[in-house]
Image (tube, coloured by chain):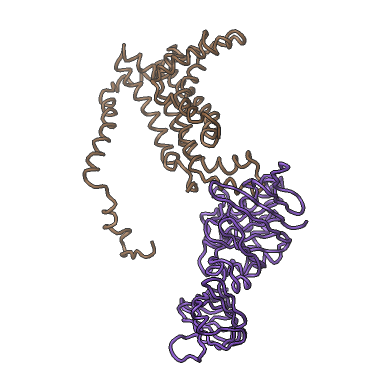
Chain colours: A brown, B purple
Amino acid sequence: MATIALVPGSSRSPRRTAQHRPPAPVIAIASIAAAFFLLPLLGLVWRAPWSDTWTVLRAHGTLQALRLSLVASVWATALSLGFGVPLAWLLARGDFPGRRALRAVCTLSMVLPPVVGGVALFFALGRRGLVGQWLDRWFGIQLPFTTAAVVIAETFVAMPFLVVTVEAALRQLDVRYEDAAHTLGASRWYTFRRVTLPAIRPAIGAGAVLAWARALGEFGATITFAGNFPGRTQTLPLAVYLTLERDAKAAVILSLVLVVVSLAVLLALRDRWLGGAVANRSR
Amino acid sequence: MTGLDTEIALRLGAFELRAAFHVANGETVALLGPNGAGKSTLLRCLAGLHAIDEGHIASEGVLLDDPVTDVFVPAAARSVGVVFQDYLLFDNMSALDNVAFGLRTRGVARRMADATAREWLDRFELAGHAGHRPPALSGGQQQRVALARALVTEPRLLLLDEPLAALDAATRAELRRLLGTHLADFGGVCLLVTHEPLDAHALADRVMVLEGGVITQTGALADITAHPRSAYAADLAGTNLLRGTMRGSTLTLGNGTTVAAAGPAFDGPAYVVIPPRAVALYREPLHGSPRNVWALHVVDVDRAGDRVRVRLDGELPLIAEVTPAADDALRLTAGAAVWAAVKASEVRAEPA
C-alpha cells in the first residue's frame, strides 16, 4: 500500500480502477439479470391504483393480515434461532452415525414444495396425526387452523436456511480457538458462549434474516396446515392470493405492502448481516 | 515426583510418538525437531487436548493421563498455560479480556480478574493497549498478549509452541529478552518448541531433539553441537552460536576477537550463527580473501559416518564439520594447531 505513490489531488490510480471493472460482457449479462428482478417491481408500481391505496390499506383485513404476517414471521425466526443453532452445531460437530442422513432430513423442506410440507405437518400434528392425536387426547390441543399452526408451518420451511448458514460457519471455524479456551480453563459450555458463539454471530444474523424472509413469504405450507381464516391464519401472502381472485387492484396494493416491508428490512440488514456471513477470524 | 514426568506413546494414523522424559520445576527445556516430528502433538498431549494411548503424564506427582487406570484430566482442569504458534487470541475480546479469560473461567470475580490482567499487561509493556482488540495490535504485541494470557493463571506447566517464529528479527530479539526474564522467574515446568537454536540457546537450560516421534538426543545445546547424533541435530540444532557486541557488520567477542558478518549492519548486543560446514580448516597460516581467519587448536574430534565434527578453541570456541577425506589429509588430533576460515557471507547475525 505504502509503495503506491499518490499523485497530489487524485485519490486513486485510474488505471487500477479500470482493471478492477468487470468486462463488458459481464456487465451486459448482469444488466439483463438485474432487469429481470426490477421489471416485475415496476409492473406492480405501474399497475397500482394509487387513488384506491388509502381505502385498501384502511380496510380492516389488510392491517390484520400484515400484523399477523409480521408476528408469525418473527416468532418463526425466534424458534428457528432457538432450535436451529443447536441443530447446526450438532450437524457440524456431532460425531454419530447417520449424521448425513439427519442433515438431509433437516434441510429437506428447503427443496420440498411447501404444500407437501403442509400436508406432512397435517399428518404429523393434525387431529388425527401421528403426534397430533395424542396432543388432542391428552392435552386437548388442536394445532391445525390456529395462529400457532402458521408459526409452525413458517418455522418448518424457514429454519433450514438458518441451519445451513450457521453450520457452514461452524465448519469453517478454526477449532483450535476452542482448544485455546479449554487450556485456559473454560468448560465446553463457557467456550461455546464466549468463543464459538461470538465468532459465528455474523452467520447467525445472516441465517436469521434469510429465515425471516422465507417465513414472511410463506404460502403453501401455511394455507395447507393453517388454512385461511382472516385474523387468525390469513397472512399477507394468503390475502394477496385470495384478493387477486375478486379484486386485482387491491391485490396489487397488498403486494406492494409486502414488497415495501421486505425491501426495507433487507436494505436495513443486508450490509450488516449478509455482508460478512462468516467471521473474519475463521481463516 | 515434582516437576513433569512423562512417558508417552501415541499413534495417529501412520505416525507414532514415543517419548519419555522428566523436567524439573524451574527448568526450561527446548524441544527441537524438523516439521512433522511430533513436537506440537507432544504439546497437545501435555496440555490435555489429546489423550495418550500408553504410558503416563504426571505433574507434581499427580497423574494427569494414565490409560491403564483410565485417568484423563482434560485441558480445562489442568494447570497449564499454552502459547500457540499463531497465538489464537480471541478477536472478539479486548486484550484485557483475553488476558482475564483464564481467571474468569476459574470463577474469579470480574473486578479482581481485570485488575490482575491489567498487572500482567503492565508487566508486558502493554498498559496502553488494554482496550484494543487483537487485530489492532502488531505481531509483537499480540505475542505478548498471548504470553500474558498463558501466564496469568500461574500454571505449573508452560507450553510455548514456536512463540517467536512469526516475528521479524528486531521484535524477536526484544521478545526473546522479555521471555528470558519471565522464564527466569517462572517456578514451573516450561517446554519450548522451536526450530531456532538461537532461541534454545538463549532461553532453555536443556535441549531435546525430537525426530520422527522419537527423542534422538537430549542435553546441553553445546554438547549436541559438538556430538550430534543425527543429521538434523548436526545441521539445524548443532550450529555455532557466539554472543558479543555488534558494530556495523562486525561482532566483537568478550576477549576482543572479531567476527565479520553479512547482512544488514546494526549496533548493540548480538548473536552470530556460524554453520559448522562453513568452517574451512588449514594447517598453514592463511593469506588472502576470507575475512574471518582465526588461529585455533583442536580440542577433540567426533567421527560419525561421513560426518567429522572438530571441536576447536583458541581465539574463539568453534565447531567445524569436515569430510573424512579432509580429516585424513589434515591429520586432526587433539592439540593440533589449525587455522579456521569462514566467509563473512556464511555468518548470520541477529540482535540479542
Who's the residue at 64% across and 46% down the image?
B53
List x then y, in percent, for residue B145: 60, 57
Q: Is residue A236 left or right of residue A133?
A: left
Q: Is residue A2 visible?
A: yes
Q: Is residue A124 left or right of residue A228?
A: right
Front residue of A185 and B133: A185
List x then y, in percent, for residue A189: 63, 38
Q: Is residue A58 visible?
A: no
Front residue of B242 and B154: B242
Who's the residue at 55% across and 42% down the image?
A198
Q: Quadrant of residue B116?
A: bottom right
Who's the residue at 40% across and 34% down the image?
A266
Front residue of B351 and A28: B351
List x then y, in percent, for residue A183: 64, 49
Q: Is residue B350 above or below residue A165?
A: below
Q: Is residue A145 left or right of residue B175?
A: left
Marker count (numbered): 0
Q: Quadrant of the N terminus of chain A?
A: bottom left
